[in-house]
Image (spheres, helix red, strand yellow):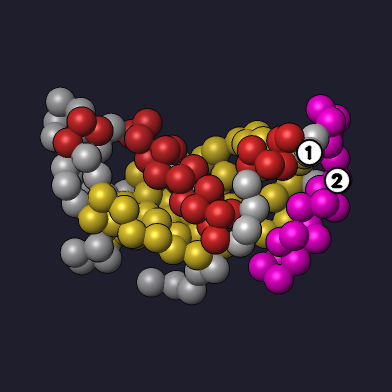
Amino acid sequence: MKEYIFSIEMETRDYELDAQGVVNNANYQHYLEATRHKWLQQEGYSFQKWHDEGLDMMVSEINIKYKTPLRGMETFVSCFNVRQEGARFIFDQDIYRKSDMKLCVTAQVTSVCLINGRLSRGEEIREMFAKYL
């Protein structure tokens, strides 16, 4: 497994499975989002607080590649790194099945920053994420 700035263990739930007995593809977006939210909490930030202050970080694009399926009640590790390209913040995220550390999903989540509803160059976020960029 490569190096990441953040990782968290989670567990799949039976109700997330599809007819084939594997985690439905849409649930991976929830896992990816929960990972970013947990990291922000750890760093002392909150999407809700930012929103109340007029700052919104919005997902503008998601590219997910499904590699190995997860099944019900499996523990997995969700990890990411973040980088900035112009005004965009790109989260390179991976999910590994914990039992064998097989890569299940790799994703690129692109976000942009809005200040009072207007697109920003991301200076406010860049200052907060500086030690990771």
Q: Residue at x 40, y 60 (%)?
A: 8
Residue 70 at what x, y percent from top left?
A: 23, 46
Sequence-wise first label, 2 or 1: 1
Location of the C terminus by quadrant is bottom right
**Which residue appears at 71% of the width and 35% of the height?**
51
Residue type (three-letter) at the residue carrying disc 1: Glu
| Up/down of 100 relative to 10, above or below | below
Give how far across and how far down residue 52 sits, in percent: 73, 35
The N terminus: image quadrant? bottom left
Q: Which residue is mark 2?
A: 121
Q: How many marks?
A: 2
Q: Nearer the viewer, residue 67 or 18?
A: 18
Q: Specify whether residue 71 is in view.
A: yes
Is 39 left, or right, of 21 in this rendering?
Answer: right
Q: Residue at x 15, y 26 (%)?
A: 19
Q: Which residue is disc 1 drawn over?
A: 53
Q: CA distance from mark 2 to mark 1?
A: 17 Å
Residue 100 vs residue 41: left or right? left
Q: Are marks 2 and 1 in contact (CB under 8 Å)?
A: no
Under mark 2, the amino acid is: Arg
Magenta stretch: give its range: 115-133
